[in-house]
Image (cartoon, rainbow, N blue to C red):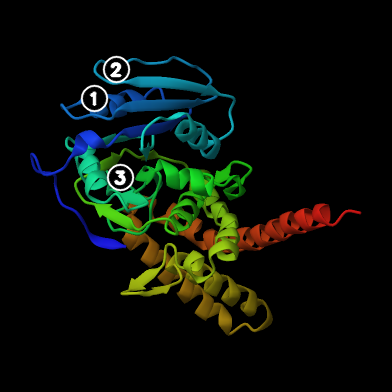
């Protein structure tokens, strides 16, 4: 990982004319957020060579137009963001594919920073730009942020097209029902076998979050059912994809690790009552850690505490169910391969 990243572009420094760049945006019922993103992409003299919006079976399909933007639309039946992104990059013509989310926008100079990095780091397989959250109101919100290298969310990341062709794009294994998770991390870890990653500090995108309800917040813990696939495919790197880093050392992510610990203490307290107090303290400490990282309003504390007391059990149940699902899938493939 090149942590220094690409410096802001200077006039005449990068041969950006030699680089072709396609932007792929999956969109589902994004009529209120997509115009802001398209407007930000068209703002400035240096824009992408093409923008492909993949409508993922929206209830109301209205292709937009944006002056000064080479925009194309693809229309799919509703299949989810993995299928939409794969359809988009396969239809694109650029040497580099940049993935953005429909609820984001880009800052001026975003495209120029990526072009400069693409021209300077032609050996790279992945270019990663910072993602900053703009909606910081309360605990019950949908938000996304990436301010350090190595996480690779598809809300702001670029891949060489030949690398995507070599690895086959995003893997639909990282979808289970309505949940999609880790497909971006899996894509990046596979891509790193074909070229290094570079952090492009000047390619800043902003994510515009929104409020969500209690049930939706708790359901987010179910996404961790897809973590066992990361562990199976990438081993320790899969365990530490969201983990704590000390130089080259990676430790498992504290959210999952603390959830396993708290759930184990709750189960242990069923058989040995003295553990009940320890489990309660551990659960409160975990909630305090999550609140400090995500933020919480005072009026939200009772409901947020209720969500945090339930989340470790839901998360651990999801991990177990995800492991069972993965084992079933692997056994099914093994059985088919050995029929007859």
Disc marking residue 1: none
Count of picture labels:
3
Observer-nearest of 248 and 10: 10
> The residue tagged with tag 2: helix, strand or loop?
loop
Q: Vertical placement of 306 versus 12: above or below?
A: below
Q: Are marks 1 and 2 in contact (CB under 8 Å)?
A: yes
Q: Which residue is mark 2?
A: 66
Front of the two marks 3 and 1: 1
Percent of width and height locating residue 281: 46, 75
Q: Is residue 336 left or right of residue 46?
A: right
> The residue tagged with tag 1: helix, strand or loop?
helix
Q: Quadrant of the N terminus?
A: bottom left
Percent of width and height locating residue 152: 38, 52
Q: Quick one: label 3 or label 1, which is nearer the N terminus?
A: 1
Q: Residues within 10 Å of mark 2 (few under 14, many from 20)?
A: few
Disc marking residue 42: 1
Q: Quick one: label 1 or label 2, which is nearer the N terminus?
A: 1
Mark 1 to mark 2: distance in Å?
7 Å
Disc marking residue 137: 3
Q: Is residue 321 left or right of residue 88?
A: right
Q: Quadrant of the C terminus?
A: bottom right
> The residue tagged with tag 3: helix, strand or loop?
loop
Mark 3 to mark 1: distance in Å?
29 Å
Q: Quick one: label 2 or label 3, which is nearer the N terminus?
A: 2
Tell me where residue 17 sits by quadrant: top left
Residue at 35% in and 71% down: 245
Front of the two marks 2 and 3: 2
């Amino acid at each position: 990982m090149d942590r220094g990243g690409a410096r802001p572009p200077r006039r005449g420094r990068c041969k950006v004319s030699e680089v072709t760049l396609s932007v792929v945006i999956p969109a589902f019922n994004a009529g209120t957020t997509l115009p802001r993103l398209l407007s930000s992409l068209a703002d400035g003299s240096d824009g992408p060579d093409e923008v492909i919006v993949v409508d993922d079976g929206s209830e109301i399909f209205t292709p937009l137009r944006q002056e000064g933007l080479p925009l194309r639309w693809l229309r799919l039946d509703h299949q989810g963001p993995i299928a939409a992104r794969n359809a988009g990059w396969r239809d694109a013509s650029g040497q580099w594919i940049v993935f953005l989310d429909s609820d984001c926008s880009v800052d001026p100079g975003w495209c120029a920073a990526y072009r400069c990095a693409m021209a300077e780091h032609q050996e790279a397989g992945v270019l990663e730009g910072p993602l900053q959250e703009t909606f910081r109101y309360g605990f019950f919100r949908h938000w996304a942020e990436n301010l350090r290298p190595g996480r690779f969310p598809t809300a702001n990341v670029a891949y060489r097209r030949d690398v995507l062709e070599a690895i086959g794009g995003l893997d639909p294994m990282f979808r289970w029902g309505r949940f999609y998770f880790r497909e971006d991390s899996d894509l990046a870890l596979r891509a790193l076998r074909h070229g290094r990653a570079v952090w492009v500090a000047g390619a800043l995108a902003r994510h515009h979050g929104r409020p969500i309800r209690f049930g939706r917040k708790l359901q987010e813990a179910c996404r961790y059912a897809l973590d066992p696939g990361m562990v199976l495919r990438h081993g320790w790197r899969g365990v530490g994809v969201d983990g704590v880093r000390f130089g080259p050392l990676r430790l498992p992510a504290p959210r999952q690790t603390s959830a396993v610990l708290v759930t184990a203490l709750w189960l242990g307290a069923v058989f040995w009552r003295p553990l009940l107090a320890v489990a309660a303290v551990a659960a409160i400490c975990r909630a305090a850690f999550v609140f400090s990282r995500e933020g919480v309003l005072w009026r939200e504390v009772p409901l947020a505490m209720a969500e945090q007391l339930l989340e470790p059990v839901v998360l651990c149940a999801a991990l177990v169910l995800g492991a069972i699902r993965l084992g079933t899938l692997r056994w099914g493939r093994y059985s088919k391969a050995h029929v007859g």
